Image (tube, rainbow, N blue to C red):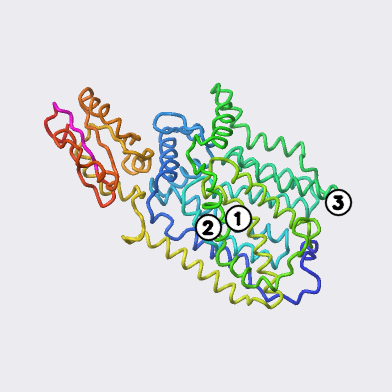
Amino acid sequence: MAETESKVEPGVTAPATLPKRPLLVVTLLAIAVGFAFQGTRGLYESTEGRYAECARQSMEQGTLDEPVLNGVNHWTKPPLTYYMIAGGMEVLGENAWGARIGQSFAFVLTVIAVYYLGFLVWGPQAAFYCAVVYGLSPFPAGASHSLSTDTLLTLFETLTLLAFWWAVRRKQGYCIVLMWAVFGFAFMTKGFPALLCLIGPAIVFFYLRRKGEKVPQFFNPLGLLVFLLVGFSWYAEKAWTHPGLMQNWIWKEGIARNVTDEAHRNAEWYKPFTMYLPIVLFGLVPWVFIILAKKDHIPWPKGLWKRVTAWPHPTEWLFITTTFLIPFIAFCVVSSRLPLYLLPLFAPMSLAVGKGIEWLVSQSQLRLRTVMLAALAVAVLVVVGKGLFLFNIPAIDSSKDMSILARDAGAIVAKYPNRDMYVLKQEALLGLQFYLHCGPVVKAELEDAPGVLKKAKLDGKNQLVFVRRKKLEAFVEKIDQRVYKVEPINDDWSLIVITPPEAGSTSS
């Protein structure tokens, strides 16, 4: 304990008194942000629908250990996220609340982990501010409201960093074993991308050893064994029982997805500037703006920017810069880019910004009351923003909300029980499957129209094609109403119906 307290700069005036039980205060704020209206918004396409429907189908078939999507094993991610989603749906039902409630717990636990990580890195005063920065910022809070692997991954990666710093402070080898165990769960959440979180700790370990400090062996044999059991045994078992699967993970999911544009995920060269840079700059609003507004009162390491090890508290800053900067560069270089990939980097970012906030408060350049008011304002804005989905507000684009499409299309689809379903010129509507418990809604192109028509004649099934109204307007005049019937669903969607000729009616 004394060791962490000594990290506060000598000569600093007494800091403002923190709230009583500061961890409880920040945890309650995080609970409000993470749980309020978590299931109000329906599942959006395409990511949320895919995760929820895969978890639902796998749970229904009893194959969560080998995730299934539309009759085919879905090997793109390990099963831990699907277990989390299925557990929520088992308790709260097959709806958005059930699918996302695990995200709420993961978010709150991450805030607590950031608190203790800040405690170990900077001391008890800064811990509160680090947790506030993470829990009461728009990007981490918003990410917890979007179903994916990233919020759960961020929890386990932050716990990995926490266990590492526990080892550094306690000088105990079992802490490193714990680090590898927790990292195993991170690996079971997203696979090989999780390896990026170990780069910073490994660099800090070698730096401390070079300085002659006694720190536990990073590559602890027992720790590595625990990691293999926790994080790699599932991969090994599935690769053994499914020949060629490991090759698919390494080459298709690992290399092809990230080196080529196979995944079609923002591979353009400029995307790091237009997508990632705004997230880094504005994802921690208002805290980063406070730092910028008070920048003249912060003792920046002038003239030493390229020599992190010459800064005050070199070990701590080396950890923060490497844990953030190296993965960030990696995310910019690879061809597959999505905004939530950056979420794990917000833990080290919060350590940096939280330390700045703590310095300003300790130097009476920023009032603790201002920090608390800003935190409450962010909490209110996030909760209100999530609650707005209760209302039909024109400014909110609801075209991706599959609960709305399922509600509006349900009665129309029910008129055609013997059917195949498609969606025109976009990814399969897995979220619609989730809500309607129907068969696949697969992707179709305009040039597929003759084949779809032929299928209606040969199979005697109605062919239903969902299409966005904006796309439909471009070619609606070309539709032969004798063959294709257009049924409007709502302001965003229409349904093109191809009825088998022999049916002679709109139902079969």
Q: Is residue 254 left or right of residue 460?
A: right
Q: Quadrant of the C terminus?
A: top left
Indicate which label's residue lies in the foreground, 3 or 2. 2
How far is the residue under mark 1 from the one under mark 2?
Answer: 9 Å
Q: Nearer the viewer, residue 83 or 253?
A: 253
Q: Quadrant of the N terminus?
A: bottom right
Q: Which mark is residue 197?
A: none
Q: Is residue 281 left or right of residue 401?
A: right
Please say if 15 is above or below 222: below
x and y, in percent, of residue 464 in the image = 25, 36
Element carrying mark 1: helix
Mark 3 packing: few (<14 Cα in 10 Å), some, or many (20+)?
few
Q: What residue is at 68 percent from the left and 60 percent from the top?
A: 118
Give, as a three-letter code, the residue at label 2: Phe
Q: What residue is at 81 percent from the left and 71 percent from the top?
A: 10
Q: Is residue 141 left or right of residue 352?
A: left
Q: Which residue is mark 2?
A: 139
Q: What residue is at 60 percent from the left and 70 percent from the top?
A: 290
x and y, in percent, of residue 285 in the image = 55, 64
Give, as a three-letter code, the residue at label 3: Glu
Mark 2 packing: few (<14 Cα in 10 Å), some, or many (20+)?
many
Q: Nearer the viewer, residue 172 or 418?
A: 418
Q: What residue is at 62 percent from the left and 72 percent from the top?
A: 293
Q: Which residues are magenta?
A: 495-502
Give, as a three-letter code, the residue at label 1: Phe
